[in-house]
Image: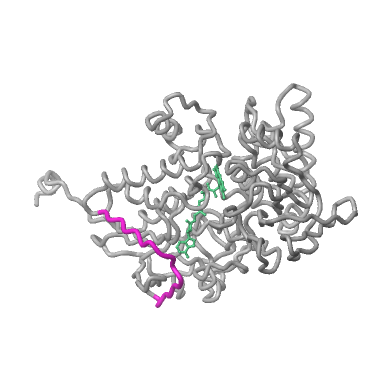
Amino acid sequence: MDAATNGENGRRGRGVALEASKPLRVTIIGGGFSGTMVAIHLLRQNRSVQVDIVEPRLPGRGLAYSTSYGEHLLNVPAIRMSAFGSEPLHFLHWLQAHGMPSADPGLFAPRRLYGAYIQDVLETTVRSAGPNSRLRHHLTPATRITFDGLSATVYLQNGERLEAGNVVLAPGNPASRTLAECLPGYFPSPWQPDALSQLAPEKDVLLVGAGLTAVDAFLALLSQGHTGQIHILSRRGKLPQVHAPYRPLPGPIPISGKLSARALLRSIRSAVRTAQSKSVDWRAVLDSLRPVTNDIWQQLAPEEQQRIFRHLKTWWDIHRHRMAPEIGIKVNEALARRQLIVHAGRLQQLRATESGLQADLHLRKGSQFSLNVERVINCTGPDSNYRGTENVFIHCLLDEGYAVPGATGRGLRTAGNGVVVDIEGRKVDWLLTLGPPRFGDLFETTAVPELRKQAEAIANHLLSITREPIEVMPELFIAAGI
Ligand SMILES: Cc1cc2nc3c(=O)[nH]c(=O)nc-3n(C[C@H](O)[C@H](O)[C@H](O)COP(=O)(O)OP(=O)(O)OC[C@H]3O[C@@H](n4cnc5c(N)ncnc54)[C@H](O)[C@@H]3O)c2cc1C
C-alpha cells in the first residue's frame, strides 16, 4: 500500500534530527483529543521537550467534547474511553472520583465530562512533567506553514510565528459538504453557535442527515423544550442502531473468498446468521472486526475501497456508530408521538418563503414532497475530502505540495506512524498526522480507541528521533580505569 519513498536527501525529508542536548521541539496544530494526547505522551516521558499547541479553544475538548448539553452522551462505554490503552480503568476511576461514585464500565457518560477528563489529564501531566519540559498553548488558529529545507515555520492568525521543529497535524474532520446556498434559516452545521438558538419552540425543523450528528441536534432541540416537528432526511432514511450488551466473539469472524466488498458483505451476513442461530447478538459480529478493520482495508484494491464507499459505507455506519441506549429510548418515544419523522430521499431544492423555508424533497419511493419549516440544518457529518475544506492551514499544505489527498480522495496520504507523504511521494519526516486526516490510508480513524494508539505512536516516534545526552555513571569511569 505504501509506495512512499524515504526522502532523506529530498527537500521535504530533512529537518527532524536534533543535536544532542537540544530539547525536542514539537508544534501541534489542533488541540482536540488527538493533539492533546500527543502532547500528554510527549510530556509524560520525563524528556527534554518543548511542545506548542495551536488551538483556538481550550485544549482537550475539540468538537466532540465541547458540547454544553448534558444530554449529549458518549457513544462508547466508559470502559473503552480511557485516555490510555494500557490503563483501561483510568476514565472509569476518574468518573468515580469526580462526582459519579457509582459509574460502571458500561456507562455512556456525558461528553462534556469526557472533555473535562482530558483537560484534567493534560493539566496533571503538565504539573508533574520534568523541569526540561514545557507546554505553550496558542489560543488562535494556524494559517500557514513554510519549510526552508531545514526547518518549518508555522504562522498563526494572531500574527505570531513559530519556529516549529516537528509538526503534528491534528485538525479533526473537515466540515460537511454544502447543501444549499446561504439562505436565512439555513445552517451549514449544527455546531454553529446560533444554529439552534432563537428558534420558536413550536416551529418545525428539518435536519438533513440521519447519523449521530442529526441525533445530537435532535437531543439539543428536545433539551431546549422544542415542541414542533423535527424532520430528518437521509438517502436511506435509517437512524443509527442502538447499543446493547452482548457476549463478544473470541476473535474476528473469517472473511471467505478473495478479499472484496462483496466477500466482506457476504461473510458478515453469513456470520450474523450463524450468530443469531446461537442467540449471539449481531453487534458481536460487527465489533469482532474492529481490531482488524484497518488491516483488511489496506489489503483491498482501490476499486474495492470505492465500492465500499458507494454501496456499504452508510449501512456500516448505521450499525457501527451506535447510539447509547438512553438516547435510543428518547428517539423511539419521539418517533412514536410523531414529533420526530424520518424521510428517505434527498433535498431537491430549498427556497425562502414568507413564513420560513420550503424544502422540496425527492423521496426514495419516487414521489415529490414539500416541507415548510422554520429552519434547515445540515447534519450530514464531515466531508472527509480535505480539498473542499475551509481550513486555510490544510489548504496551504495541499497548495504547497507538503500533503496530498489519499487514494480515495479522503483524508491525506500517510505512511506508518502517520508520517505525511508529499506530492512527490516522499515521506515528510517533520510532518505527522493522526485522526481524520489518516482516512487517506485507514478506514477506522476517528474514535478514541484508535486515536489514543496513534497519539502514543507519534509521541514515541518523535522521542525516538532525538538523541538524549548520555549519562555516564561514575562507576563506569572507575571500571574503565579513567
Ligand atoms: C459529535 C461527536 C461525538 C463523538 N463521540 C464520540 C464518542 O463518544 N466516542 C469516541 O470514541 N469518539 C467520538 N467521536 C469521534 C471524535 O472525533 C474523536 O473521539 C475525537 O474527539 C477526535 O479528536 P480530534 O482531535 O482528532 O478532532 P477534533 O475533536 O475535531 O479536534 C480538532 C481540533 O483542531 C482544531 N483546529 C482545526 N484546524 C486548526 C488550525 N488551522 N489551527 C489550529 N487549530 C485547528 C479545532 O479547533 C479542533 O479543536 C465523536 C465525534 C463527534 C463529532
Residue lying at 36% horizontally and 61% vertically, measured from the top left: 26
Q: In the image, is 66 to the left or to the right of 162?
A: right
Among all residues in the image, which is located at the extreme top? 278
The kind of secondary structure the magenta stretch mainly shows is: strand
Q: Is residue 294 above or below residue 88?
A: below
Mark count: 0
At x 56%, y 65%, the residue is 4
Q: Position of residue 374 (x, y in %)?
A: 69, 56
Which residue reaches farthest right? 366
Q: Is residue 240 left or right of residue 156?
A: right
Q: For this rendering, which residue is in front, 175 or 359?
A: 359
Using the rendered image of the protein, determine whether residue 382 is visible from the camera's viewpoint. yes
- Tell me where residue 75 appears, x and y as whole percent: 58, 39
188 within the magenta span: no
Residue 347 falls in image quadrant: bottom right
Percent position of residue 370, x then y: 82, 56
Identify the magenta region: 133-149
Can you see residue 292? no
In reply to whether residue 147 is colored magenta, the answer given is yes
Q: Position of residue 357 (x, y in %)?
A: 73, 61
Q: Quadrant of the N terminus?
A: bottom right
Residue at 40% x, 54% y: name it. Answer: 58
